[in-house]
Structures are given as C-alpha cells and as structure tokens.
Amino acid sequence: MRVRLLLVSTLAAFAFPASALADTFTKQDLTIAGAGGTPLAATLYEPTSAQPTGGYPAIVMFHGLGGTRASTNVLAEFFFAAQGYVVLTFDARGHGESGGLWGLDGPNENGDARATYDLLAARPEVNANKIGAYGVSLGGGAVWNSTAIAKVPWAAIVPEATWTSLYDALFPQSLPKSGLIAQLGTLVPDARTDPEILARKPDAIAGTNLADLHAFADARSVRGKLSSVTTPTLMLQGRRDFLFDADQALAAFKELRGPKRLYLGDFGHAPSSFASRDLEYMETEARQWFDRFLKDEPNGIDKRPPIELAKDPFTGTVSYAAFPPQSHLTLRARGGSFGTNAVVRTFRLPKRRLETFGAATVTTTVTSSAPVAHLVGVLSAVVPDGTETVISDGGVPLPVPAKARRVTIRFMNEVTAIPAGSRLKLTLAGTSGAQSAGNLLYLLGNPLGTRVTVGKVKVVLSTLARPVSR
C-alpha cells in the first residue's frame, strides 16, 4: 500500500450520466468576506425553477486539503444545483484564489463557515431556516467544527471521509503516522499556512511535544462534544481509509442524539479512491438527506435502518438497525527478534471468506538491547495466488526502560474483505515499510543497532458475523 492523499479533485474524472445534468441553474463567481474580512473566492449556483414558498433551500460545500472549489463544483452541478438548491462553494482560506492562511479548521475557518451561512441567510430568495452544509475530508472537519464548536445553525449536515478526533486519526495510541503527516504537510505551501501549524509540523512528524499537539488537535475535534448536537447528520465514511478510519464516524454515531445515518462506502483516502464505484449512489443518498430535512420531503431516508455498508467491490449495500454483529478470532504464535528487519508470522484462517470490522489487536511482550522508541504492526491477508492486501496498520510507543513490558497494539478499523483460503500475516518491526517498501504510513525508525525481542503473540481479529463482500 502506498499511503498518499487522493485529492477530492479526482471526482471531476467520474463519468456521471448525462441525464444527471439539467440547464436549471445559473452560476456566478464572486468574492465574499470571511473571518476578519479575508477574501474568499466563491461560486454561487441558483435554480431557475420557480421559487418555493419561504425561499429556496441552500447548501454550503467545503472542499478537501490542497484542493479548491472546482471539486465541489462538480458535485454541486450534478447533484444539487439542478435539483432546486442554492449552492455556495468556495476556496478555503490559504487555498486556490482565496486569501488568508490555512489553519486546519480552527477559529478562522469556523468564522468563514459562519460568514457563508450569514451570506446565504441574508439573501431574500433563500430560506434562512433551510441551509445545510456538506464537506469532504478537511471540508468535513469544517462542517463538524462549525456545527458543534462554532454553533452555526445548519439545518442538516453531511460530513464525508473526515475526522471526529484529529489526534486519534494522526497519532493513534500517541504514535504519529509520520509518513502520512509529512505528506499532508506538503499539500499547502508554507507561505499559505498559519505559523501555528508550521511551528508544530516537526513535532507532529517526530511525535514530540505530544501534550501540545493533543490540545491543538482537540480544539479542532468534535469527539466528546456531540451529545448536544441535534442537527440531522448523514456521515459518509470510507470502508478502507488509512487517514480517517471507520471508527472516526462510528464514534460520532454513538454520541449523536438527533436524526443520524452512517454510510460506509468504497471511497476515501488511500488505499481507497474518491472516484469510486458507489459515488453516484452515495451522492444521491446525500441529496435525499437534504431533500428530507431542507425540503421537508417525506422520502423515508430517516426511517430506514441507520447504518449502511457498501459491498466491496460495489454491487449494492447491506443495512443494519445498529452496529453490525461481529465475531472475533483469536490467533497465537511464538515470538522472535529483529534489528533492522522484522518478526513475521503467518496464521491459518477459517477456510470461508471473512470481512474485518472493528479494531484488531496484537498483544505481546517486548524487550530490547537498548531503549527502543516504538513497535509497529501490519496485518495483511495473503490470498492463495500470493497476492498480499494490507488489512490494517497500528503502532505503540514504548517506555524508555529496556526491560520486558507487555504491550497491545490497537489497529485502525478498516473494513476489509478477505477471500476464502487466505492466510493472515503479521509483521512486527520499527516501521510499516518492513511489510512493504510502499507502506509509508509509519516511517520513524528505532535507533540503529537496537535488537528487539517480542514474546508470544496474541492476535484478536474482529470480523463481521456475516460477510457482505465477495
């Protein structure tokens, strides 16, 4: 797996059916004033159909990191503007044609969200009580934060492929996804980035000053703040997303008290793609969510089982009234030692097909010839033809003493189909690159010459009680 951020601009390459478009809207580029008067380049879509009583419903759309409104314009034109919605898209501060400095969905971005809401609410053709928000990745974070932290009164929201705990996403178990963080740091030029972020970039990659990073990330996260949010919320999250795993949305689903729905689909950051097979399906569902809560159409989407899981490859979905029933496999193996290499163990699996759901864990004891910084694990499936697919990655920092200590690695929740006849492979090392040169998630190594010994290994693999994919 090559960990890289697939920008939402790839949506523009998706082959939408010609029938999805209709000449029923106007399109106007404009500049609006964001927080502190920062100029934000925007595009306004307005329907040419008859204005409904009370005014048109409206949607503000937020794009992903390093992108521009060009990507959200594609969605606006195919799914919303032609269906009777006023739509406002804009380049986030520090991006595209907008001014300002990128602040990772901080106070300034919350102010920008409020400015977009106020602009639409003040327009006489817009129903100020029927304005929703849709955001992808970084934009999804902006939707969450503007709702739960800045209290922008959106009438319905759709956050997609994003975080609810930024710290847990970037520093799971307090070990940085160093390779991924380094790459994210290149997507916006330093000259367009807030100095607060630039000052923290070295610590984020190295995993130092974690208390400061935790506080910084928590101020941009809604985990633990959602129990009072009653805004109707449809979450779109990727089955396999090594930046923002399924638990980012599942945790929010547990907290939310208002109307809520979760779609886990075949899209997202690496190893998924935003130009996915189920793109049209899920965007149609997003429009149905807005139709229900912005147009008050009784289309029944809020009455259906609230958790929906796409099959992989996409041939349809399976719905659940609550979290899908799970089973757990416990596997054991002997330990071993590694220096610059790795301890690799393979396990027989049941001969039937499996599908992971939930966080796998690996528990072992660790000793070392000198203090060692961390232990990284990679779980992969090796199919009968020898092809290997990463199931998930995880890692844990280790205390300074070199004496034996017991550790548990909690892996990211990636919903991965495992074909019948596969074997499970566990790689334990100092970096994820020990499993494959293309696995660039965890890149921080341990001190040269350090010998690490792991004791007996216990793997607990969480799977769907009934797989949905083939």
Image (cartoon, rainbow, N blue to C red):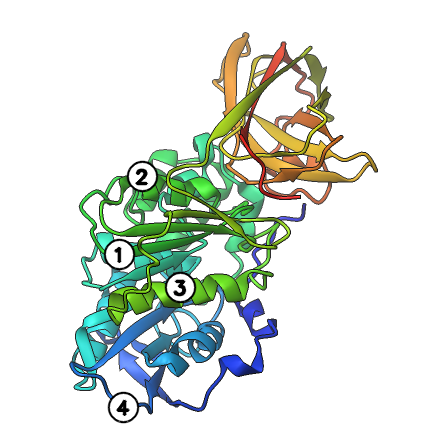
Q: Position of residue 192 (x, y in %)?
A: 42, 67
Q: Which of marks 1 and 3 is nearer the N terminus?
A: 1
Q: Do the residues labelled 3 and 2 touch (CB within 8 Å)?
A: no
Q: Callout 1: 10 Å neighbours few (<14), some, many (20+)?
A: many
Q: What residue type is labelled 4?
A: Ala
The residue lying at 69 percent from left, 24 percent from top is 349
Foreground residue among 139 and 250: 250
Disc number lying in front (2 or 4): 4
Q: What residue type is labelled 3?
A: Ala
Dot 3: what SS?
helix
If the image is split into quadrants, where does the N terminus sit? Answer: top right
Disc 1 marks which residue? 232
The residue lying at 27 percent from left, 47 percent from top is 219
Disc number lying in front (1 or 4): 4
The answer to whether 435 appears left or right of 169 in the picture is right
Q: Earlier in the sequence, mark 3 or mark 2?
A: 2
Separation of marks 1 and 4 at Cα, in angstroms: 26 Å
Q: Which amino acid does label 2 sit on?
A: Lys
Q: Quadrant of residue 347?
A: top right
Separation of marks 2 and 4 at Cα, in angstroms: 40 Å
Q: Earlier in the sequence, mark 1 or mark 4?
A: 4
Disc number lying in front (3 or 4): 4
- Label annotation for residue 254: 2
Disc 4 marks which residue? 50
Separation of marks 3 and 4 at Cα, in angstroms: 23 Å
